[in-house]
Amino acid sequence: MGGGGQQTDRITGTNGRFGTYTWEEVQKHTKFGDQWIVVERKVYNVSQWVKRHPGGLRIIGHYAGEDATEAFTAFHPDLQLVRKYMKPLLIGELEASEPSQDCQKNAALVEDFRALREHLEAEGCFKTQPLFFMLHLGHILLLEVIALMLVWCFGTGWINTAIVAVLMATAQSQAGWLQHDFGHLSVCKTSRWNHLVHKFVIGHLKGASAGWWNHRHFQHHAKPNVFKKDPDVNMLNAFVVGKVQPVEYGVKKIKHLPYNHQHKYFFFIGPPLLIPVYFQFQIFHNMIVHGLWVDLAWCISYYVRYFLCYTQFYGVFWAVILFNFVRFMESHWFVWVTQMSHMPMHIDYEKHQDWLSMQVHSELSHLFPTMPRHNYWRAAPHVRALCDKYGVKYQEKTLYGAFADIIRSLEESGELWLDAYLNK
């Protein structure tokens, strides 16, 4: 555990059980192998626990040396259960003179947001309507069956195949949103059932990995649009995003691509390639490198089912072509729908904001990850009122306006890069 013998002295030397710490002391423990976090004023040494954390080791590391109370509450539906697992990690608490929030966060805003969450819980906004998710799963399975029956009954002609591909792409996209629900533990009462159904949906219905998704996605929601912490803003040097990164690249004369034209080539390398190329490679690489063999088994079951169903009609070559065309269409759907609430938003390095401000500034959703999505509309007016109270910008957009903002933001970032590249 980080801290060695000195840590043991602090635990037993202050009040017979554990020590008290200042924020300055906590903030010294931020490096891998020596990481402390604060939850509800209690100080935990998570240096070794990060390797066993179900949400991945990096998400806790992103809060090392910080108050993680709001993230802890947001991601865990059964707080009492998680607190039991955390007891062995407890090494002390904040000194009485220390504020509950670090980094000069607005204590009143944090407290009002906590009260809002309690109000929404009391109103039943975190309770699931099972029928909603049963119907969602049912319509995915129905689309898959209809697609196969169309091939069975009407053959492999171009028009029929196009219809089949649209149905399959729709099923894949809808399965993507459904696995998101189970992955965030927002459907079943117990985490175990959420995890099991998540593996079925993302593995057997989509051919992807639950472990890979957890590792990426929880980081994204923990620190949305924060460079070096949110993997979703790692653009692999294909794009520059936000207002800070373009200037950095320009000043350093970094030019992997002509970024001043990125709003144009986005159409060719963004939506078409993300799922069929980048995600496809990353998923299998992640499962093999990290030994996610259960995920791999679920994933293989998808491919076995798909090729058993379609090679008998199309043969191996055309079944592969159909598979990739479906992924190609799904990728367009996924990129446009997800990036409209991320790419045009605030993107920067770590600013240590409170949960409400960070989430609302950086994305248009997921202030409450464990809330079933059929209840978002009930929470929205309350969130907007709280934002208005503290001057936090609350955004609502039309679908067309949100799509247009993606291209506008890429163009603006490209112009910032070009100006810095030529003039600084």
Image (spheres, helix red, strand yellow):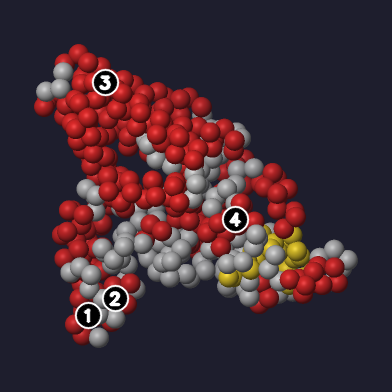
Q: Which mark is on residue 249?
A: 2
Q: Nearer the viewer, mark 3 or mark 1?
A: 3
Kindly state the secondary structure of the residue where label 2 is placed: helix
Three-letter code, disc 3: Leu
Work out whether residue 366 can be spotted.
Answer: no
Q: Dividing the picture into quarters, in which one does residue 109 lie?
A: bottom right
Q: CA distance from mark 2 to mark 1?
A: 7 Å
Residue at the location (28% across, 33% down)?
Answer: 170
Q: CA distance from mark 2 to mark 4?
A: 34 Å
Quadrant in the picture for the N terminus:
bottom right
Q: Dividing the picture into quarters, in which one does residue 319 lie?
A: top left
Tell me the crowding category of disc 2: few under 14, some 14 to 19, or many 20 or more residues within 10 angstroms, Cα based.
many
Q: 200 above or below 63?
A: above
Residue at the location (76% across, 65% down)?
Answer: 92
Q: Which mark is on residue 148?
A: 3
Three-letter code, disc 2: Tyr
Q: Which mark is on residue 83?
A: none
Outermost residue toward the right in this view: 16
Tell me the crowding category of disc 4: few under 14, some 14 to 19, or many 20 or more residues within 10 angstroms, Cα based.
some
Q: CA distance from mark 1 to mark 4?
A: 41 Å
Q: Nearer the viewer, mark 1 or mark 4?
A: 4
Q: CA distance from mark 2 to mark 3?
A: 49 Å
Residue at the location (54% across, 37% down)?
Answer: 195
Q: Which residue, given by chain and number where applicable, does mark 1 sit on?
A: 421
Residue at the location (17% across, 59% down)?
Answer: 265
Q: Which residue, given by chain and number where applicable, does mark 4 sit on?
A: 51
Closer to the chain start, of discs 2 and 3, is 3
User: Percent from the top left, x then y, of residue 373?
Assistant: 45, 39
Three-letter code, disc 4: Lys
Three-letter code, disc 1: Tyr
Position of 278 with respect to 96 (left or right) is left
Q: CA distance from mark 4 to mark 3?
A: 43 Å
